[in-house]
């Protein structure tokens, strides 16, 4: 099955499975797991932070960051399309009593700096205290420019805000620009990095920050039920995600571009090639196309997609260039019948 629903469907590599089987483990809640400790130390050094924390998911890593930067009744600024606002169950509000202030995302995925500046609340007890700016890179497959990140960092500093990066796919952003991940993370006080999407680890994300923030996040992680015991089995795969899977993302980007170019030739689909910057392709189906029939027909052809008028197709390590060719042929056949 060629599965385009997300890069979360990636299977761990053979090397990851071997490393997991052989991993040295301890009790991570006690701080005794040597493989987790090695992963956290390695990640902190790689990305330019004092400390790192291994978490079970990107949602957890983002929530821990928000709850560690903000107190009850505080506010964070983010985009309307931000994952930690739109797709993480309202955790900041429900569990952290933190007010999100969502702002419009521009076409390139950024938030206009003037909108950020205007949304910062005065120091007045009528208002929630604005404490944090949260950005996402990549967002919708699009890469935020380095110049923009530098300006956002300066804005946050000038207004006494901390700045967090939801970097679930920050490795994609780095590879797309020919940069090191640390070139992007340098602009942030904290960063979450997902290891189980394009980097192919079976489970886990990292939260990075200074020692004070990570100590606070570690306490919140325990309170939220995120303390893991012999987690080195997972950390062993996460290490290989960082050391063996980052450069390979360029293949996913090339496959996404080839897929988009092929789909753009089909009259039933409309897409903007300029928006295909990493491993995501968005295409809008013509009104006359029966979405359910398309999804069912593609499934019979061995291609799995999520059904919506605007399709999101995500490439990853388990989709090859040959799979792209098969998929394009499958689209042609099914669209001719629905």
Image: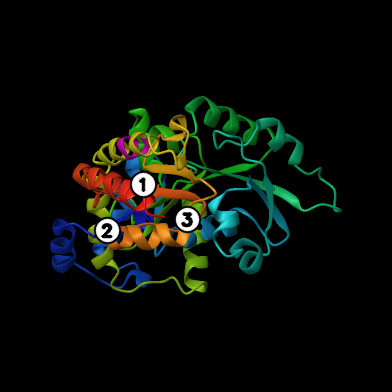
Residue 322, labelled with which disc? none
Q: For marks 3 and 2, give the one nearer the viewer.
A: 2
Q: Residue at x 37, y 54 (%)?
A: 337
Tell me the SS state at disc 2. Answer: loop
Q: For marks 1 and 2, give the one nearer the viewer.
A: 2
Q: How many marks?
A: 3
Q: Mark 2 sits on what residue?
A: 301
Tell me the SS state at disc 3. Answer: helix
| Stretch in magenta | 256-260
Residue 54: in sight, yes or no?
A: no
Q: Mark 1 sits on what residue?
A: 44
The question of residue 224 being in magenta is answered with: no
Q: Residues within 10 Å of mark 2 (few under 14, many from 20)?
A: some
Asked if labels 2 and 1 touch by Cβ distance under 8 angstroms, the answer is: no
Q: Is residue 293 above or below residue 135?
A: below
Q: Is residue 210 left or right of residue 330?
A: right
Colour scheme of the rendered structure? rainbow
Q: Residues within 10 Å of mark 3 (few under 14, many from 20)?
A: many
Chain-order first, disc 1 or disc 2: 1
Q: Is residue 117 left or right of residue 133?
A: right
Between the residue at mark 1 and the residue at mark 2, the CA separation in whole angstroms equals 44 Å
Main SS category, magenta section:
helix
Quadrant in which the C terminus is drawn = bottom left
Residue 214, labelled with which disc? 3
Which corner quadrant of the image does residue 304 belong to? bottom left
Q: Is residue 304 above or below residue 190?
A: below
Q: Is residue 298 left or right of residue 209?
A: left
Asked if labels 2 and 3 touch by Cβ distance under 8 angstroms, the answer is: no
Chain-order first, disc 1 or disc 3: 1
Q: Is residue 203 above or below residue 162?
A: below
Q: Residue at x 15, y 68 (%)?
A: 21
């Amino acid at each position: 099955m060629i599965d385009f629903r997300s890069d979360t469907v990636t299977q761990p590599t053979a090397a990851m499975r071997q490393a997991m089987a052989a991993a040295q483990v301890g009790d991570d809640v006690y701080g005794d797991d040597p493989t987790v400790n090695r992963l956290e130390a390695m990640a902190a050094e790689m990305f330019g932070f004092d400390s790192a924390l291994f978490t079970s998911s990107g949602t957890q890593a983002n929530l821990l960051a928000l709850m560690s930067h903000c107190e009850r009744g505080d506010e964070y600024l983010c985009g309307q399309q931000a994952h930690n606002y739109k797709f993480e169950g309202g955790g900041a509000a429900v569990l952290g009593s933190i007010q999100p202030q969502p702002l419009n995302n521009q076409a390139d995925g950024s938030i206009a700096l003037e909108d950020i500046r205007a949304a910062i609340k005065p120091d007045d007890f009528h208002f929630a205290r604005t404490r944090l700016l949260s950005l996402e890179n990549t967002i919708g497959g699009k890469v935020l420019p380095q110049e923009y990140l530098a300006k956002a960092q300066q804005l946050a500093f000038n207004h006494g805000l901390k700045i967090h990066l939801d970097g679930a796919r920050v490795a994609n952003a780095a590879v797309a620009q020919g940069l090191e991940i640390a070139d992007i993370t340098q602009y942030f006080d904290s960063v979450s990095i997902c290891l189980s999407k394009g980097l192919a680890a079976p489970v886990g994300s990292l939260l990075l920050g200074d020692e004070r923030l990570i100590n606070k996040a570690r306490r919140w992680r325990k309170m939220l039920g995120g303390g893991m015991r012999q987690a080195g089995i997972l950390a062993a795969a996460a290490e290989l995600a960082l050391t063996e899977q980052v450069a390979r993302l360029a293949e996913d980007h090339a496959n996404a571009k080839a897929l988009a170019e092929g789909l753009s030739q089909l009259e039933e689909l409309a897409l903007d090639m300029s928006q295909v910057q990493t491993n995501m392709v968005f295409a809008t189906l013509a009104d006359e196309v029966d979405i359910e029939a398309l999804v069912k027909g593609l499934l019979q052809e061995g291609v799995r997609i999520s059904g919506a008028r605007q399709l999101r197709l995500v490439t990853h390590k388990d989709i090859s260039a040959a799979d792209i060719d098969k998929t394009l042929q499958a689209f042609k056949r099914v669209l001719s019948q629905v």
